[in-house]
Amino acid sequence: SLSDRLGGVFDRLRGRGALSEADVREAMREVRVALLEADVALPVARSFVDKVTEQAVGQQVIRSVTPGQQVVKIVHDGLVEMLGSDAVDLNLDVTPPAVVMMVGLQGSGKTTTTAKIAKRLTEKGRKKVMMASLDVARPAAQEQLRVLGEQTGVATLPIVVGQQPVDIARRALQAAKLQGFDVVMLDTAGRLHVDAQLMEEMKAVARVAEPDETLLVVDALTGQDAVNVARSFSDQVELSGVVLTRMDGDARGGAALSMRAVTGRPIKFVGVGEKLDALDTFDPRRVAGRILGMGDVVSLVEKAAETMEQDAAERLAAKMSKGQFDMEDLRSQLRQMRNMGGIGALASMIPGLAKAKAAMANNGPDDRLLLRMEAMVGSMTPKERAKPDILNAKRKIRIAKGSGTTVQDVNRLLKMHQEMSTAMKKLRKMGGMKALMGLMG
Ligand code: GDP
Ligand code: MG
């Protein structure tokens, strides 16, 4: 697995320091191979790796896991973010009938998925749904949808032999309006390859039907070609989402990342079998895990991060009890908090942090706040970090400029540091580290 492969790259790093740029770059070569093996298209893999490299460099190594595992977690989180963290529903909140158009290559699973979605909307969404096949290219295509309609109890537009796709679309919309359907699903014809005629037909249908949802259906086994398929379709029609079929097979799911990257649209459903209820909403965490081909690494690292929290707390307590806590320590605390996913548990242990957070709350999520604080410390000279007392107005302006913040922000950071120092002195009088640990527990 990827995490085994990264083991070799990182063994010597175990238990010390931060992830260096050279080490991360070496690891990312393995990550890139893993992505390509999972069928992520090359340009997509490349740009993803660049992005994640930036995030990984400088992260503190968690003592109880290997750096390789830690990188897997970072890559995993990056994948989840890129795949889209939240499931996105169909947007059918329009004046009925809402029009859903299915597009894609022949054999990708359009007709099956049309029936699956229609069934789901009927049963779970309690919508009145009509399906219409615009596939006049394949002789049995319209009949296929009619049979699926019978199996699922979903209405289908009666077949009129000899009618062209655009006319069928018009008739479907009219019928749906007259008969009070909530949703019309248009199942278009595919071709074996992207060709001009197919695209023209699809565009003509889109002009007539003005779909509220245009879903690109893609076989998850589409490898390097996924980028071309996605680009051709999204160049021609405005897609609103992607459906990835055949995820029940051996597919590693790399096509999901390629589709998302090229179309910029969310993956809305995943087909997981031939049966008509074999349709899942998209779960980015599961697909990310599958792309990386790893077992439990993510939860292992999450557990280890909890342990690190404990380590960090002990180190912080030790520093405080000795009466030493400079801006450098503050910065490493901020960084650790950010790596652990936010202010979370340590916030209650750091006097003044909650207040600073409240004062700067309009500046976005925890993560950004911590980054800004880190940036401020980063803009200080080593001397300023060791002796924040020397910070005069001129120096503060320089720091604010250097970190893209304001002098008020710098003052708040200093105040927070001040409060931490004061608390530390008090704690020393109360019995030092033991007392602090007691407070934390
Ligand atoms: P279309 O040409 O795009 O309309 O594709 P079809 O809907 O006719 O599907 C082609 C074949 O793929 C059929 O045999 C389907 O049963 C099968 N199929 C569609 N979706 C899935 C899926 O998610 N998993 C599996 N295993 N087979 C699927
Ligand atoms: Mg079909």
Image (cartoon, rainbow, N blue to C red):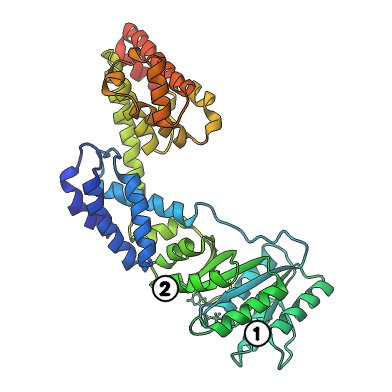
Q: Does residue 109 sit above or below 391 in this rendering?
A: below
Where residue 210 appears, as percent x and y from the top left, is 70, 70
**Can residue 278 be seen?**
no
User: Which residue in the protein does label 1 denote?
Assistant: 147
Quarter of the image for residue 118 reads bottom right
* Camera-nearest residue between 369 and 253: 369
- Residue at the spot 43% in from the left edge and 58% down from the top edge: 286
Where residue 199 appears, as percent x and y from the top left, is 58, 79
* Camera-nearest residue between 363 and 10: 363
The 10 Å Cα crowd at callout 1, few under 14, some 14 to 19, many 20 or more, is some
Where residue 182 appears, as percent x and y from the top left, is 76, 67
**Amino acid type, mark 1:** Val
Where residue 99 appears, as percent x and y from the top left, is 70, 69
User: Which residue in the protein does label 2 denote?
Assistant: 249
- Give the mark, 2 or 1, whose residue is nearer the N terminus: 1
Q: Quadrant of the N terminus?
A: bottom left
* Camera-nearest residue between 299 and 133: 133
Q: Does residue 137 sit above or below 122 in this rendering?
A: below
Q: Does residue 98 sit above or below 439 in this rendering?
A: below
Gap in angstroms between the C-alphas marked 2 and 1:
25 Å
* Helix, strand or loop at mark 2: loop
Q: Quadrant of the C terminus?
A: top left
